[in-house]
Image (spheres, coloured by chain):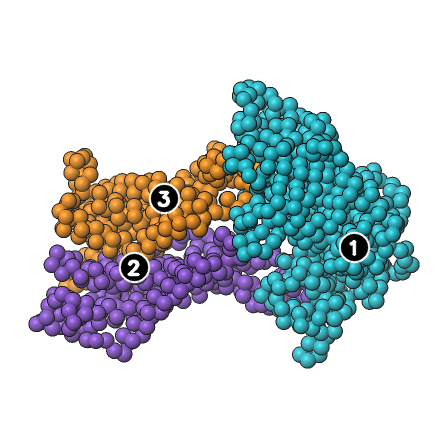
Chain colours: A cyan, B purple, C orange
Amino acid sequence: MSANPLLKVTNLTLRLANGGSLIEGVGFSINAGEIVGIVGESGSGKTLTARAIFSLTPPSIQRTEGSILFEGKEVTQLTPSGLRNLRGARIGMVFQEPMSSLDPSMAIGEQLDEGLALHTRLKTAQRRMRMVEMLTRVSIQDPVSALGAYPHHFSGGMRQRIMLASAMLLHPALLIADEPTTALDAIVQKDVLELMVDLTRQYKTAVLLISHDLPMVARYTDRTIVMHRGRIVEQNTTPELIRVPVEAYTRKLLASMPHRGPVRATSKAPLIEVRNLRVDYPGRGSLFRVRAPKQALKNVDLTINRGEVVALVGGSGSGKTTLGRTIIGLIDPDEGRVLFEGLPTARGSDGWKRYRTECQMVFQDPASSLDPRMTVGALVEEALLSMQNITRATRRERVRETLQEVGLTDALADRYPHELSGGQRQRVAIARAVIRRPALIVADEPVSALDVTVRAQILELFSSLQAQYEFSCLFISHDLGVVEQIADRVVVMRDGEIVEAGERNQIFDKPAHAYTRQLLDAVPRLPNGLAGVTRADLRAVS
Amino acid sequence: MKTIKLNAAIGASVTGLVVLAALVALVWTPYDPLSIGFTDRLAAPSWVHWLGTDEFGRDVLSRLMAAASTSLRISILTVMTAVLLGTIVGVAAGYVRGWTDRILMACNNALLAFPGILLALGLLSIAGANERGIVVALGLAYAPSVARIVRGSVMSLREMDYVAASRIMGNSEFFIIRRHILPNCVAPLIVLATSMFGWAILAESALSFLGLGVPPPAPTWGNMLAASRPFIAHAFWLALFPGLCISLTLLSINLLGDALRDHLDPRMRGA
Amino acid sequence: MIRLLSQRLLAALPTLLLSAIAVFAMIRLIPGDPAALMLGDQADPASLADLRHLLGLDLSLPTQFMRWAERALHGNLGVSIRTGEPVLPLVIDRFWVSARIILIAVTVAAAIAIPAGMVAAWRQNGKLDISLVSMATVLLSIPSFWLGLMLLYVFGLKLGMLPVVGYVSFSENARAALLYIVLPLATLVLHEIGILIRMARSSTLDVLRMDYITHARAKGLSEATILRRHAFRNAFGPTWTLIGLMLGNLLGGIAVVETVFTIPGLGRLLVDSILGRDYPVIQGCLLVIAFVYVLINLVVDLLYPLFDPRVAEQ
């Protein structure tokens, strides 16, 4: 610890108008050139803390207590113009959503120029040169024409690079990166993060990296701070924190990290067979032009055996969601077929009706997969409505049983989705899927929208249900950690094709295809078998 | 939050007052709105006639109350017509898509190509300038706006995962429309219906003012205003009160609509 | 840009065609026999039959439509039943009178209301905001014909400051024209301000919630600069569309203001012709208004990319 840290936060407390505190007693420091990470789940207060550093908190925050010393100046006492001098010039920020962080109505060059024109005395030509240099540095091709382009011309990864360029143009002393890569694909994530570390090292900029992704923070930071419910739970150098976590919550966090699941003996009897599947993107052709249709799925073959969990991985645009939706029957293939127990499942064919009852789906976002106007009980009961010869009482009884199976109490049956937490909502979605004991469940990113600790619980629930009812599962995910824990077999997709498929251990330990290797490389993972952390820690503090 | 409650309170109470007056007028008014009294013409407001009398000696207050009934009745019928027609078209176009959608929307857009009151005027020349004609003309004129909003709602609801989930569970398309689509359309419809109610009252007054609405001697606020023009220099109150009634009614409906919209909109403005 | 223009023009054609059909159909649906109306109830059957043949009423409907459309495209919209003047020049004349008033009114209203709405959104829930919103709500609840009548009473009759009836065109006497036009303009402006303030405020509120606004703050920009550079361009789009709709609505709705102030405009012409069952004139008015409205929306659409560049590329 040097004598004069760049940033020193002491006893910071932020309160709402009614006195309730959002963050309390937060204290930490950052030295020049250091990379510090703040890890926490939703509601931990990590973003608020970061924004408080240069007073960018929302207007509902009425009272601030404690002190924030940046470069020797007390931020909480600064005048508005003092703050404005600080922002952008000494402290820069990169936001999470590349889609919405750049003004869509303004060209990139204008936006980059704003900070430069405001904080430096450079002439127009000089500013332009700096911008072009920086854009080249962040690997934007053809930087000169990029200056005149609009944000929607760029992909998510490129926009994030532009944001980095924008923040680093002024060589700030501190860069705050708030979930900078959460919205990006795994491979792009790695590129952007490496770029960020590189750039900040070059300009000796300290970094405050905020994320819910502990392995990622562990890979890139010197020190880590763990926050939970508005307070700092623990802080330490990163290697120490990972190796010897002290607090119960930290241990719980680490225990929730996905780890490799056991190898199971699975049957070789095929349940689902996909042959020569081709699905085209819905055409946007006008009356006057015929466009060659782009293919979402090109000639895909796949087999799912009874009782096994097959994971489908790939980046966005890989076709994994399309494949999942085609298998379950939401999308009709343009060519090829899907067979269930040997019978075709196409609409109107013999196997269609039977297939409908034997195949269910769990969606990613419970906010859009649960009708907000229906109660929990009604939502789960809806799955039984198309069953013949079943009375209302029997239906209700079954709903109650299933709710208990997924860990929800009876009392919740009369609540509405918005009254439940994210984890509870996903349990409802799972209950709805398993209540008819289907032979196949397609799960499309079922845990991606959940907090890490909740994720671990839901995965456990899923595994135990799967072991109990022996349904086959097509598990679609971009998160390799989750896949490693739950899958028996792994199928890797890219651009609508399957590039590699095999046993889980084999794919993870000895990947054959270059793309698979690239994917595995891009994902930061914590070492297996962390000292002293056990499954019991999962159920500790909540 | 406070503003919403205030809006709702004022809006609801004034609207309630108007509705009350209208309902009461159906059975009783201080004087007969149609009875002509040659002795008491153009009398200023007094204890005998609280709001004065018009050029035929008819009591202004009674006429205003009767006018309230007429206006409210016409507006309610208009909104019901527009909502019914518009919802059917909107659901059909938004859910079925394809050629049904294209044809329906082409017709809808052709109707929308006429600015609001113009379409009503055109339809009025066919339907005739009377109460039934106004309901038909205005109802048809507003239906395309309803259709457009409902169609938009339905199109985005269609893509919801819970619709897909219901399909996977084996439920029929009709079931999905009834159980999932329609109930979730209700919120924006209510807000629109409240606005339309205000438009209808305004439109009916305007049409009556122009001489194209409910013909005299039956009173509506609009034709009372029109009739007041020659006497405005000497009997100012004849022009004041009917206009005040329209304004207050519209204001309260707008406030109510605002409160409703804020209440139903999950992104609370300024919370 | 050219492609966008031609695309939109092409898309507008079917709408124009359907609107023309709608106008034609509306007139044909009016109960009553046009021939009898023109000749009177007492005319003998032979004259009626002759007139019907002359008017082409004995031909099939599609043929009638073709004839009418063909004539219309050549600028011949028939003659007024009441006055005998040719319809198209009459309608165009009146159109200019109304259009001038409408354009000035909307421009003035927008120039006042849009900045006011943006400032109200900026100082959300403050005293300024609440008073602006309340004022706007009151203004848009007052029917324009009553507002006009009240203004007329106060400024025309009681205070005697402005003339009460009549209209003088600018070409005759500019100073007098100004006096005659002030009250109707004020009526319209006040009403439109109510609507525009609320729309400008709500779309600015939406924009101020966006991430790129926080990003701009993080760069150190002042609130005023942010409003000016980032908020305005992004918030203006929906208001711009609303202005287009308002212009169209006023084309017909101005009839009430024209009635109050006795202005010989298009709205008044339409109403008079409906009351007088002057079908060719009704037809002419509806057709011209629909046509102009489609044109207005076209212009609004074409200028939209200035505020939202994403639209241009679709």
Q: Position of residue A536 (x, y in %)?
A: 84, 59
Instruction: Name the kind of residue labelled 1 in the image.
Output: Ala
Q: Name the residue tied to disc 3.
A: C113
Secondary structure of the residue carrying numbered label 1:
helix
Horizontal arrangement in the rendering, residue A264 relative to residue C23 (left or right): right
Horizontal arrangement in the rendering, residue A437 relative to residue A292 (left or right): right
Q: Name the residue tied to disc 1.
A: A248
CB within 8 Å, label 3 to label 1: no
Dot 2: few (<14), some (14–19), or many (≥20) neighbours within 10 Å? many
Q: Is residue B131 above or below residue C301?
A: below
At a point 33% along the width and 55% down the height, the residue shown is C138
Q: CA distance from mark 2 to mark 3?
A: 21 Å
Dot 3: few (<14), some (14–19), or many (≥20) neighbours within 10 Å? many
Q: Position of residue C302 (x, y in %)?
A: 44, 38
Same-chain status of marks 1 and 2: no
The image quarter containing residue A94 is: top right
Instruction: Name the kind of residue labelled 2 in the image.
Output: Ser
Dot 1: few (<14), some (14–19), or many (≥20) neighbours within 10 Å? some
Tell me which chain the residue with mark 3 is part of.
Answer: C
**Viewer-nearest residue: B54 or A40:** A40
Q: Is residue A2 above or below residue C258?
A: above
Q: Position of residue C232 (x, y in %)?
A: 45, 39
Q: Name the residue tied to disc 2.
A: B247
The image quarter containing residue A414 is: bottom right
**Viewer-nearest residue: C245 or B144:** C245
Q: Nearer the viewer, mark 1 or mark 2?
A: 1
Kindly tell me whether residue A367 is visible in this rendering. Answer: yes
Q: Nearer the viewer, mark 3 or mark 1?
A: 1
Instruction: Name the kind of residue labelled 3 in the image.
Output: Ala
Task: List the single residue furthest toward the right.
Answer: A265
